[in-house]
Structure formats: C-alpha cells, structure tokens
Amino acid sequence: DGNASFHPNPNRTIAQYDWNVDGQAGFEGSGAVFNYSYNRFGTYTVTLRVTDDLGRTDTDTFDMVVDQGNQPPVARIAQNAYVVLEGDDLVLDGRGSSDANQNCGDRIVSYQWDIDGDGQFGGPADATGANPTIAWATLDAAMDWPADRNTGLPTNTVTLQVTDTFGRTSTQTTQVTIFRAIPEAVVVQTPNPSPINLQTGFSRTQLDGRESRSPVPGVNIVRYN
C-alpha cells in the first residue's frame, strides 16, 4: 500500500506508482495499492517508485519476509514394527517423511532418532539421518531384551522427529522387539529316572526333543542331532 506517499509541493501530484516486489529487474505492478502472491518462502526486497506529474521520481524500499502459512513436516517410518535377532544391526528408514511446502522452498533439514526411549534426542545411543543403521552394540546397551516368544514382550519404542527449515517438527514412533537368535534345546526323558534291566544291563529310555523351539515366533526347528 503506497497511499501514504505524498508530494512535498502542494502544487504537484503523484501521477504513477510502480512496484518491484521480487528484487529482480523490472516492475511487477502499478497503482497505489498492489496485490501480489509469493509462491516461495523467503525474504524479498520490495521497492515502490512514485512519479509526479512532471516525471520526477522517488523510491522507498523495504524487506518482505514471506513465512506465513507454513505447515509442519510429516514424519513417516517405513515399518510400524521391527524384529531384530541377537547380534544383528537395525536399519531404520524415515525416507518416506515429507514436507507439504516443498514447492514453496521449505524442506526437511533434520532427522533425529530417539533410540533409548528416554524422550530426548541427541544422546549417546541416539541417531541422525533419514536411513541410519544402529549397531548391535548400541541396541544391546540401550534396549530391553530378549523378548518372550509367546508374549512378544518386552518391546522398545523408537521415535523419529523431523524438522523443517522454519523449525517446525513432527514425530512418529515404531516398536523394536529383540529375540535371541539361538534355538533352545529341551530334552524330555521317559521314564525319568530310567531303570536298568539287571539281566541285560541296559535301560530302555526315550529321549524326546520336540519341546525344543526357536525363541523367534514363526521360526521352527528343522534338525535334531
């Protein structure tokens, strides 16, 4: 709005208003009031040039900061649950996170992961980046395990926080369950104790390993030796 412009000579009038709103060469509009929509966030140098009825000009310049209407980014983890076996690393994936204002110049500038579940980011066990690999040594120290085959407990909550260029944030969580990798051997002896035949010196004993199991749900024993 250039209506506050005036001429110090009461005998002269302002005949023309020209607006440069993007800091580039040339004028984008005219008139005492000029409406313009920016399609990208940023700081723009705006210049108003006024011309009087004798063709003489004056200019005024200010900076226009365009940062309103920004929406927070959306954090998205590829899986809502991860299963890890003892000794394995964990690969997390937050690359599906997005920013609705990307076409306006906004973007995600930070991916932070709370690995140990303390609600804080940036700790010794925590990670950064869109697709980090968490070493087994870190999982071993920071998480509760092993999980029970039947209950699936305990589980561990991992949180991803994404931040955009304006500092707005969004979070999403996933669950991590750690099982022992080595199968559990269980032997059932029948009878127990097993008596020895005094005439033959032998004992008739049945050994049954069918109670053996993998600690991981859905994994079966395939060989008994």
Image: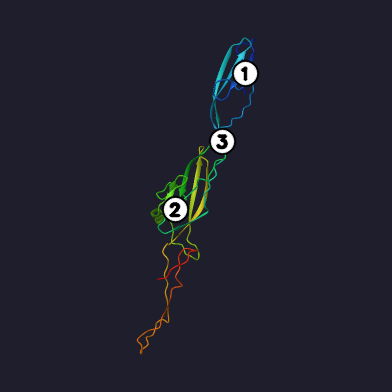
Q: Residue at x 49, y 50 (%)?
A: 159
Secondary structure, mark 2, is strand
Label 2: how many Cα within 10 Å (few below 14, some 14–19, many 20+): some
Amino acid under label 3? Answer: Asn
Residue farthest toward the bottom in the current orientation of the protein: 199
Image: 194 above or below 75 = below
Q: Is residue 37 left or right of residue 177?
A: right
First in sequence: mark 3 vs mark 2: 2
Q: Nearer the viewer, residue 214 or 145?
A: 214
Image: 210 above or below 161 = below
Question: Pointer 3: what residue?
Answer: 103
Q: Is residue 131 left or right of residue 39?
A: left
First in sequence: mark 1 vs mark 3: 1
Return the x and y of residue 17 as percentages of the image width and height: 62, 18
- Residue 72 found in image quarter: top right
First in sequence: mark 2 vs mark 1: 1
Q: Nearer the viewer, residue 13 or 224?
A: 224
Return the x and y of residue 10 as percentages of the image width and height: 63, 11
Secondary structure, mark 1, is strand
Question: Pointer 2: what residue?
Answer: 90
Tags 1 and 3 in contact by the CB under 8 Å rule?
no
Amino acid under label 1? Answer: Tyr
Point out the frontmost of discs 1 and 3.
3
Label 1: how many Cα within 10 Å (few below 14, some 14–19, many 20+): many
Question: Pointer 1: what residue?
Answer: 17
Quadrant containing the N terminus is top right
Secondary structure, mark 3, is helix
Tags 2 and 1 in contact by the CB under 8 Å rule?
no
Q: Nearer the viewer, residue 166 or 4?
A: 166
Point out the frontmost of discs 2 and 1.
2
Amino acid under label 2? Answer: Leu
Q: CA distance from mark 3 to mark 2?
A: 33 Å
